[in-house]
């Protein structure tokens, strides 16, 4: 019996080229978002475009877009990475100031460097964005491409911060060094109401949280949770004043411009959740800005023009938990730093970043530092977890370990 000759296997698509694009407006939104997905609003074309179109990301602020794009043999975009040329280390939240100082004291030029991140935003998420039907090597080619760009232009380093595990694994395989840190996240364990969460806490901690909420309730302020179209221009005007007041108080720089908030109101309205406190006359006096992802409420900026005890905790944390519980969201992330979050039910979660260092001697020095820093971070997290407000034996993490 004769068997027919099997057809020749179809050639597998490959990444044909990588290129740098100087403005996200020059990348089709549909193509970018096909790679970014819909789970995390901060890597969406709309959010990153708002950063650039509003002037928040620019040479003025030291974040110059140089986005990396991967195309297949048909010229279709199959991968990308939000990438910026930077002349400083501000607005990153994985700080390398000491590295820069050491490199420059040794006679090198640390800046400019490359940063793959969401500007001014310490939100974990994908950094090597890959379309679902992209060639299998796309993520690895993006990782290698970041190092190739730095090497070609003689840059000292590339830093990929708050990245997901699959990205970090590809970056380490491409010669990047891995760094660990941590943030405080809250996990929804199927709570039906805020009191269900409180019942998971030790008695003394539960009473303390209730007293904080009661104090704000007795302050005479009206608290509102506004979503999308409920947020009026007057709210954005007030919130920008809050933002500037907070920047001034912390001696920081106001990276975000007023038009940025108009941009996200127009293009990301369904993702925006604004917690507002109003005085007796209905004038906003404090606010906390959040963005909603597929399974997470992300707390971002906060500010106030009044000094009310516990108002920060109420708007930034407790009302975020109220919203997440009501909407069935599994997680709330409230940004970087802040061990005060621990006492309010947010537990430490490891963050991963990856760093390519071009100079071999400096790379060895940084690698040695990171080899000591990683176990120290793990030890710090282990020491913090028992200090959480949860009942003994309940670590506050979700069933997967957070």
Image (spheres, grey):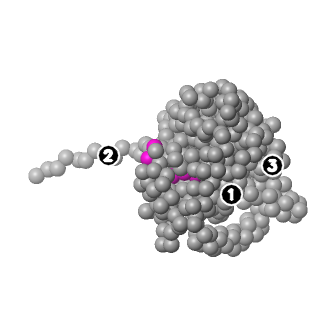
Q: Which of 6 and 340 is in front in this view?
A: 340
Q: Which of marks 2 and 1 is nearer the N terminus?
A: 2
Q: CB under 8 Å between callouts 2 and 1?
A: no
Tell me how far mark 2 sits from mark 1, CA to CA: 56 Å
**Residue that label 1 marks:** 337
Q: Nearer the viewer, mark 2 or mark 1?
A: 1
What element does badge 1 sit on? loop
| Residue drawn 73% across the image and 70% down it | 369
Residue stretch in magenta: 327-333
**Residue that label 2 marks:** 8
Q: Residue 262: percent from the left, percent from the top?
A: 66, 28
**Residue that label 3 marks:** 250
Q: Residue 226: percent from the left, percent from the top?
A: 57, 34
Q: Which of marks 2 and 3 is in front?
A: 3
For residue 23, say whether it is visible.
Answer: no
Does the magenta segment cover residue 329? Answer: yes
Does the magenta segment cover residue 402? Answer: no
Q: CB under 8 Å between callouts 2 and 3?
A: no
> Within 10 Å of the Cα at label 1, are there few (<14), some (14-19), or many (20+) other Cα atoms?
some
Q: Earlier in the sequence, mark 2 or mark 3?
A: 2
Asked if residue 197 is positioned above or below residue 323 in the image, the reply reads: below
Q: Residue 172: percent from the left, percent from the top?
A: 59, 61
Tell me how far mark 2 sits from mark 3, CA to CA: 65 Å
Asked if residue 15 is positioned above or below residue 387 in the image, the reply reads: above
| Residue drawn 60% across the image and 30% down it | 231
């Amino acid at each position: 019996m004769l068997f027919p000759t099997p057809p020749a296997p179809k050639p597998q698509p490959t990444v044909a080229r990588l290129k740098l694009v100087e403005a996200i407006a020059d990348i089709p939104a549909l193509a970018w978002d096909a790679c970014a997905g819909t789970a995390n609003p901060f890597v969406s074309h709309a959010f990153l475009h708002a950063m650039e179109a509003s002037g928040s990301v620019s040479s003025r602020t030291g974040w110059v877009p140089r986005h990396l794009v991967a195309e297949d043999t048909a010229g279709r975009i199959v991968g990308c990475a939000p990438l910026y040329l930077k002349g400083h280390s501000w607005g990153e939240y994985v700080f390398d100031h000491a590295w820069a100082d050491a490199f420059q004291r040794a006679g090198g030029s640390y800046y400019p460097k490359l940063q793959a991140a969401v500007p001014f935003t310490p939100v974990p998420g994908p950094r090597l964005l890959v379309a679902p039907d992209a060639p299998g090597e796309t993520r690895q080619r993006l990782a290698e491409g970041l190092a190739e760009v730095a090497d070609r232009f003689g840059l000292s380093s590339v830093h990929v911060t708050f990245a997901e595990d699959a990205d970090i694994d590809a970056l380490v395989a491409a010669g990047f060094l891995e760094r660990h840190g941590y943030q405080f996240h809250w996990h929804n364990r199927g709570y039906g109401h805020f009191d269900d969460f409180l019942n998971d806490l030790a008695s003394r901690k539960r009473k303390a949280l209730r007293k904080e909420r009661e104090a704000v309730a007795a302050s005479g302020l009206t608290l509102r949770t506004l979503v999308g179209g409920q947020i009026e221009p007057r709210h954005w005007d007030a919130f920008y004043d809050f933002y500037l007041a907070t920047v001034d108080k912390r001696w920081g720089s106001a990276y975000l411009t007023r038009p940025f908030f108009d941009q996200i109101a127009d293009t990301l309205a369904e993702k925006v959740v604004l917690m507002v406190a109003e005085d007796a006359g209905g004038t906003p006096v404090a606010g906390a800005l959040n963005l909603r992802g597929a399974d997470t409420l992300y707390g971002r900026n906060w500010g106030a023009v009044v000094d009310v005890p516990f108002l920060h905790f109420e708007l930034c944390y407790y009302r975020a938990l109220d919203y997440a519980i009501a909407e069935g969201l599994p997680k709330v992330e409230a940004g970087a730093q802040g061990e005060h979050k621990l006492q309010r039910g947010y537990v430490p979660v490891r963050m991963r970043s990856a760093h390519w260092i071009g100079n071999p001697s400096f790379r060895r020095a940084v690698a040695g530092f990171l080899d000591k820093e990683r176990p120290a971070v793990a030890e710090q997290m282990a020491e913090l977890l028992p200090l959480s407000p949860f009942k003994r034996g309940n670590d506050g993490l979700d069933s997967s370990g957070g």
